[in-house]
Image (spheres, rainbow, N blue to C red):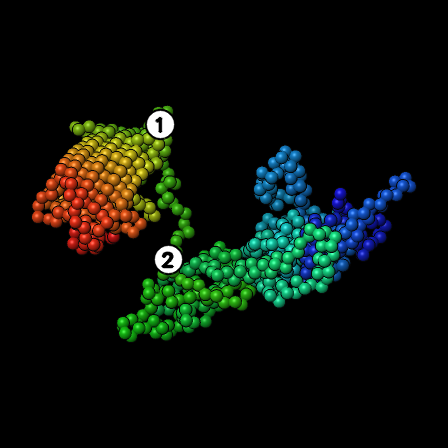
């Protein structure tokens, strides 16, 4: 019942100077908000439409029968015609727009097929580069050579800007566009900044495009400050725009807006006619606050120390804010300047630059501490005292940013991400693949592993008896995303070794099926690694079930000879000897260790966290730290276990429980210990039955709230056991 009309008067008649205009319900433009929008544009000499509220009656003459339909209080909105240009004090010229018909045609098609609400985001991906630039009043322009030339110029300007070939400041009157942009943000009229909603006037005097205010839905909440399209990298524009933002978002200007002549009267009349219409001053006030937050955020710089000498301090500075900033000084937090006078350095949004600050000759004296004898700048201790002084471009409000004492991260792509490593097994002439059976196999023989052998997902990697792989250089390793079958024989074991002392190791990760390792020797392996990535074991299985039998891990040079994480495992008849650090480390695993031997271990023989394992018929001798260690809510059940000549026999910590039966602890410095290491967990507990402790060492050391039930008797407890661990009295020195 509230139709909208486009009115065209005949014979050069006008109403209030307008020959073409629209009549529509005030709600279509958000009532008084749009009127205020045009009033503000007019006050800043930005092209605006004549926009007024009137009473509308429709008189229909049908064969002498007249009927009158009362539409009530409507808005009269000027259309884009030559009278608009004249009313804004501009020389006759052309008005152009980006053709929006393809967008509306697509929307109609979406709605016809009930797709619009679900897939409306698709419409935002439409590329304006493919749309035409059209003139208003095309027939009269084509018949006037002067106006047609102007249209050709305006079209080329707009197309070049949309295509990114020209900067906005090359084609627009940036004073006018910046005022338009800033007013749209203050009033929340950002709907009028969508390119296909904007109309542009070509000014033939200065040969620049100017925006014309239209369809803003003004007086709406605006939670973010929006740059006009494609202007964020144009520093000429940004400087003018930021000054306008500061001006229009100031408390004085906001007060001026809220008391704009005629605003209250229009609001009162509209609310009388439309009782549901609401107006809130908070909209304008809060929009201005958001703008002030955006142009002067709490911080927008990431700053890193690159290097320094007697003359310069070099900082790498990243601007992650919305607007460009100017760097103009390096100061102490207390205010004194360190650098000689400098020209401001501009950093655009999203840009990172290294800036050199030339230092005052006497800057070192600012860091002298006579009592401690300190006489020079020390980046580790003194960088926290420094501040970068900066301001948003065009805004004379200085702020300060702290500096980090390390270098910034690299901008290079993460080529070291193992998930992106190329599966280049084809370059190894002894590696063959069967695409039909999804098998990649290493042919028997003595081979040197030249580089990283990456096995992709979806295969099985097989190595056959008698094969030897020499990890002979610093980048030699196997990374498999598929299960492995390394199956040798007692007469022809498979050997993985390192002839040069600097090779890496093996990792199987996220494999789809279980792996088998039988009759294999792993000798002198180190951890697999790339520049930014490394694991802890010489041999590793992550989220990859594995069964290891009749194998040996010797002379391991990594933190763990074998590291298994987040999976199930079984070990049977496996030998660990001469490990640099831990022999077996299990994290979040479930499994069984039986008939195994651990000897001459640098740190822990068996160390698990967050795990549930069983240990049977196993001997541990000469462990440099702990023979059997459980942490972080682990459970270990052990039978027929012998631990001798080790630093600590059995250790339970951090809400773990170890249950042993028919075991022998002989000649260890400390037999049992249970304590809490990490505050996030609880105490440790040990239950030992049919178990002997021999030798001159301390039988047990149990912390208060932890427990040892040894052959049916509860052991005494003491305070602060952890203070006697990790090399203080027992165990091996390490980070807690």
Q: Residues within 10 Å of mark 2 (few under 14, many from 20)?
A: few
In depth, the one of 633 and 52 nearer the eye is 633
In depth, the one of 451 and 708 nearer the eye is 708
Q: Residue at (76%, 59%) from the top-left corner?
A: 87
Residue 407 numbered mark, or none: 2
Q: Position of residue 40 (x, y in %)?
A: 68, 60
Q: Position of residue 664 (x, y in %)?
A: 12, 40
In depth, the one of 566 and 157 nearer the eye is 566
Q: Residue at (12%, 49%) from the top-left corner?
A: 698
In the structure shown, which secondary structural element does the residue marked by tag 2 occupy? loop
Alpha carbon separation for disc pair 1 and 2: 45 Å
Q: Name the image quarter holding residue 362.
A: bottom left
Asked whether, in this view, residue 166 is left or right of residue 261, the answer is: left
Compared to residue 599, the image places residue 347 above or below, namely: below
The residue pinned by badge 1 equals 438
Q: Residue at (72%, 58%) from the top-left corner?
A: 268
Disc 1 and disc 2 in contact, CB within 8 angstroms: no
Residue 89 numbered mark, or none: none
Is residue 105 visible from the viewing direction of this image?
yes
Compared to residue 288, the image places residue 479 above or below, namely: above
Asked whether, in this view, residue 438 is left or right of residue 653, the answer is: right
Q: Which sits earlier in the primary sequence, circle 1 or circle 2?
A: 2
Q: Name the image quarter holding residue 655.
A: top left
């Amino acid at each position: 019942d509230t139709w909208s009309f486009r009115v065209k008067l005949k014979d050069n008649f006008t109403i209030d100077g307008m020959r073409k205009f629209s009549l529509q319900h005030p709600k279509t433009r958000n009532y008084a908000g749009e009127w205020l929008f045009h009033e503000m544009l007019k006050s800043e000499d930005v092209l605006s439409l004549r926009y007024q509220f009137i009473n509308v009656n429709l008189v229909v003459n049908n064969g002498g029968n007249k009927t009158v339909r009362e539409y009530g209080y409507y808005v009269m909105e000027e259309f884009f015609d030559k009278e608009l240009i004249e009313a804004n004090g501009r020389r006759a010229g052309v008005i152009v727009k980006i053709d929006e018909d393809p967008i509306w045609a697509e929307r109609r098609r979406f709605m016809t097929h009930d797709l619009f609400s679900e897939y409306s985001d698709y419409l935002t991906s439409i590329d304006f580069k493919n749309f035409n630039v059209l003139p208003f009043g095309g027939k009269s322009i084509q018949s006037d050579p002067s106006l047609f030339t102007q249209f050709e110029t305006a079209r080329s300007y707009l197309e070049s800007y949309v295509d990114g070939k020209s900067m906005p400041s090359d084609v627009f009157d940036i004073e006018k566009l910046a005022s338009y942009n800033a007013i749209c943000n203050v009033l929340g009229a950002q709907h009028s900044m969508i390119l296909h909603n904007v109309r542009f006037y070509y000014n033939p005097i200065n040969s620049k495009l100017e925006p014309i205010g239209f369809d803003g839905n003004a007086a709406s909440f605006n939670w973010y400050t929006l740059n006009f399209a494609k202007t964020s990298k144009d520093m000429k524009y940004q400087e003018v725009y930021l000054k306008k933002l500061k001006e229009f978002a100031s408390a004085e200007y906001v007060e001026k807006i809220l008391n704009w002549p005629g605003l209250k009267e229009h609001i009162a009349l509209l609310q009388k006619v439309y009782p549901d219409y609401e107006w809130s001053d908070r909209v304008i006030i809060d929009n201005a606050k958001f703008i002030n937050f955006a142009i002067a955020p709490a911080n927008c710089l990431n700053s890193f120390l690159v290097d320094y000498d007697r003359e310069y301090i070099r900082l790498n500075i990243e601007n992650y804010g919305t607007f460009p900033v100017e760097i103009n000084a390096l100061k102490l937090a207390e205010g004194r300047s360190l650098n000689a006078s400098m020209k401001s350095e501009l950093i655009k949004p999203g840009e990172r630059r290294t800036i050199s600050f030339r230092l005052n000759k006497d800057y070192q004296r600012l860091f002298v501490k006579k009592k401690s004898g300190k006489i020079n700048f020390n980046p580790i201790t003194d960088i926290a005292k420094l501040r970068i002084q900066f301001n948003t471009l065009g805004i004379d409000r200085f702020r300060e940013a702290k500096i980090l004492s390390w270098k910034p991260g690299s901008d290079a792509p993460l080529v070291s991400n193992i998930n992106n490593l190329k599966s280049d097994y084809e370059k190894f002439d002894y590696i063959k693949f069967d695409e039909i059976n999804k098998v990649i196999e290493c042919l028997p023989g003595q081979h040197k592993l030249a580089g990283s052998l990456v096995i992709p997902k979806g295969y099985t990697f097989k190595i056959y008896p008698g094969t030897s792989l020499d990890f002979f250089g610093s980048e030699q390793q196997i990374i498999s995303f598929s299960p492995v079958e390394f199956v040798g024989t007692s007469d022809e074991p498979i050997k993985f070794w390192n002839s040069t002392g600097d090779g890496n190791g093996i990792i199987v990760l996220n494999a789809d099926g279980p792996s088998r390792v039988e009759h294999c020797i792993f000798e002198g392996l180190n951890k697999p690694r790339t520049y930014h990535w490394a694991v802890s074991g010489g041999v590793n299985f992550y989220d990859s079930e594995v069964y290891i039998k009749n194998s040996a891990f010797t002379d391991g040079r990594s933190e763990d000879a074998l590291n298994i994480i987040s999976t199930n495992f079984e070990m049977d008849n496996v030998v660990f000897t001469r490990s640099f650090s831990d022999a077996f480390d299990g994290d979040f695993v479930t499994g069984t260790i039986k008939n195994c031997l651990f000897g001459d271990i640098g740190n822990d023989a068996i160390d698990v966290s967050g795990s549930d394992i069983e240990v049977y018929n196993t001997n541990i001798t000469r462990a440099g730290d702990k023979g059997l260690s459980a942490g972080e809510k682990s459970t270990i059940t052990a039978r027929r276990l012998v631990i001798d000549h080790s630093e600590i026999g059995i250790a339970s910590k951090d809400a773990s429980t170890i249950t042993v039966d028919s075991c022998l602890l002989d000649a260890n410095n400390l037999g049992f210990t249970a304590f809490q290491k990490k505050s996030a967990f609880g105490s440790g507990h040990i239950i030992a039955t049919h178990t002997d402790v021999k030798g001159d060492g301390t039988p047990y050391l149990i912390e208060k709230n932890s427990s040892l039930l040894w052959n049916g008797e509860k052991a005494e407890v003491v305070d602060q056991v952890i203070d006697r661990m990790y090399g203080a009295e027992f165990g091996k020195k390490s980070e807690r």
